[in-house]
């Protein structure tokens, strides 16, 4: 079989580029340029496959302009950068990278929660600025983690990882809201109780957002929801920008409607709402929840595994729209000597 053509839309570990080069004619982007949609379309011409990350939008326009494209493998568990319906209509397979990042991302969610509730970065900035002159009884006094009520919105694999850490590691009462409740067995294991969204907002001392983004959850947390939370509460978002109304959150932090927020994802990232940058009571990180080296490497290998499996006719590991597979879409590539 001739080698198919593959575009790597962003820079990735050199060993992944080398591995993929054994199976594909690779066009890589090791300079890590961030392309416009028009540049992405131009780069996709003649490509059968794309290795994408969360910032690479594969929509109807890209698909219409890229007739050779057969598969996009996302190095992310979230895939809101894919218009999956349009991909299915175009016969383009999408894959994501779940499971391999669950524990690393849950670790980070907990780290961000603790840094936020215990005011770790705020106090470090104070110290580095030379402002620490004496001990005081309430110097950076924050909220407790142990024994408090942990609310989780979105109880998939990562949400469950956070619940486990909270219940078993820190003796927290775990409440959650999700599209549907977990089984009683899983609830018992996690010591987690299903509640309405309203009760979650009202009862949580710390609320962690871990739900996948879709337009239906846009601004799930806005001014009205923030007003329902405790004034002592902490909000943590490791899910996606757009789930929180960042302007409303900046206002709520300024007004002390809630005590503090820990944010790894933002509306319009890498740009941030100026009110968030100004606020002292917020911990800000640049979308790094899955960023341990072993996990990022495992995510990249999983994306590569999917690409290699697809063109070798082997079962896909994590397909998102497996229905397109029944169309034997690799056949034209195998026969098409023009591209391979
Ligand atoms: C990725 C993520 O690093 O997996 C996800 O959904 O948000 C992160 O782990 C990011 O999307 C880049 O692909």
Image (spheres, helix red, strand yellow):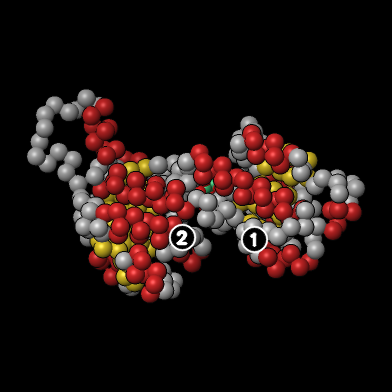
Residue nearest the viewer, comparing 294 with 246:
294
Q: Where is residue 37 drawn, in percent x and y? A: 65, 47
| SS under mark 2 | helix
Answer with left or right where residue 303 lies relative to residue 250: right
Residue indicated by mark 2: 157
Residues marked 1 and 2 touching at CB (< 8 Å): no
Q: Upstream in the sequence, badge 1 or badge 2?
A: 2
Q: Where is residue 27 drawn, in percent x and y? A: 73, 38
Residue appearing at x 56%, y 42% in the figure: 297
Give the quadrant of residue 165: bottom left
In the image, is residue 56 above or below residue 29?
below
Q: Residues within 10 Å of mark 2 (few under 14, many from 20)?
A: some
Residue appearing at x 50%, y 39% in the figure: 293
Residue appearing at x 65%, y 43% in the figure: 9
The alpha-carbon separation of the residues under discs 1 and 2 comes to 17 Å
Residue 229 visible in the snapshot: no
Query: CB at mark 2 closer than 8 A to ligand 1?
Result: no
Residue nearest the viewer, comparing 335 with 65:
335
Residue nearest the viewer, comparing 206 with 66:
206
Q: Residues within 10 Å of mark 1 (few under 14, many from 20)?
A: some
Q: Where is residue 242 drawn, in percent x and y? A: 45, 56
> How many numbered discs, if any?
2
Q: Where is residue 162 drawn, in percent x and y? A: 37, 56
In the image, is residue 295 above or below residue 158?
above
Answer with left or right where residue 100 lies relative to residue 317: left
Which of the numbered marks, if any, corresponds to residue 319?
1
Give the quadrant of residue 178: bottom left
In the image, is residue 282 above or below residue 18?
below
């Amino acid at each position: 079989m001739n080698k198919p053509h593959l575009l790597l839309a962003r820079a990735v570990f050199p060993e992944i580029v080398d591995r993929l080069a054994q199976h594909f004619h690779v066009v890589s982007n090791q300079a890590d340029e961030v392309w416009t949609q028009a540049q992405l379309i131009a780069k996709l011409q003649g490509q059968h496959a794309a290795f994408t990350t969360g910032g690479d939008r594969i929509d109807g326009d890209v698909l219409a302009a890229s007739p050779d494209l057969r598969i996009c493998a996302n190095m992310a568990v979230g895939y809101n950068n894919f218009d999956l319906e349009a991909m299915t209509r175009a016969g383009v397979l999408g894959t994501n990278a779940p499971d391999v990042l669950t524990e690393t991302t849950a670790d980070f969610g907990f780290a961000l929660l603790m840094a936020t509730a215990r005011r770790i970065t705020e106090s470090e900035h104070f110290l580095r600025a030379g402002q620490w002159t004496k001990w005081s009884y309430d110097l950076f006094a924050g909220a407790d983690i142990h024994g408090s009520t942990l609310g989780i919105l979105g109880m998939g694999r990562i949400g469950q990882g956070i619940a486990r850490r909270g219940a078993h590691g820190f003796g927290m009462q775990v409440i959650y809201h999700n599209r549907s409740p977990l089984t009683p067995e899983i609830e018992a294991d996690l010591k987690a109780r299903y509640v309405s969204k309203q009760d979650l907002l009202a009862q949580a001392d710390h609320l962690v957002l871990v739900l996948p983004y879709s337009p239906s959850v846009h601004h799930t947390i806005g001014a009205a929801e923030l007003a329902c939370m405790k004034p002592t509460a902490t909000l943590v978002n490791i899910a996606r920008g757009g789930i929180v109304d960042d302007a409303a959150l900046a206002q709520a932090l300024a007004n002390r409607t809630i005590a503090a927020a820990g944010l790894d994802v933002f509306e319009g990232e890498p740009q941030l709402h100026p009110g968030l940058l100004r606020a002292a009571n917020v911990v800000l990180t640049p979308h790094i929840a899955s960023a341990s080296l072993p996990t990022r490497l495992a995510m990249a290998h999983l994306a590569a595994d999917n690409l290699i499996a697809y063109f070798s006719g082997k079962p896909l590991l994590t397909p998102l729209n497996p229905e397109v597979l029944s169309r034997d879409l690799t056949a034209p590539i195998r026969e098409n000597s023009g591209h391979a």
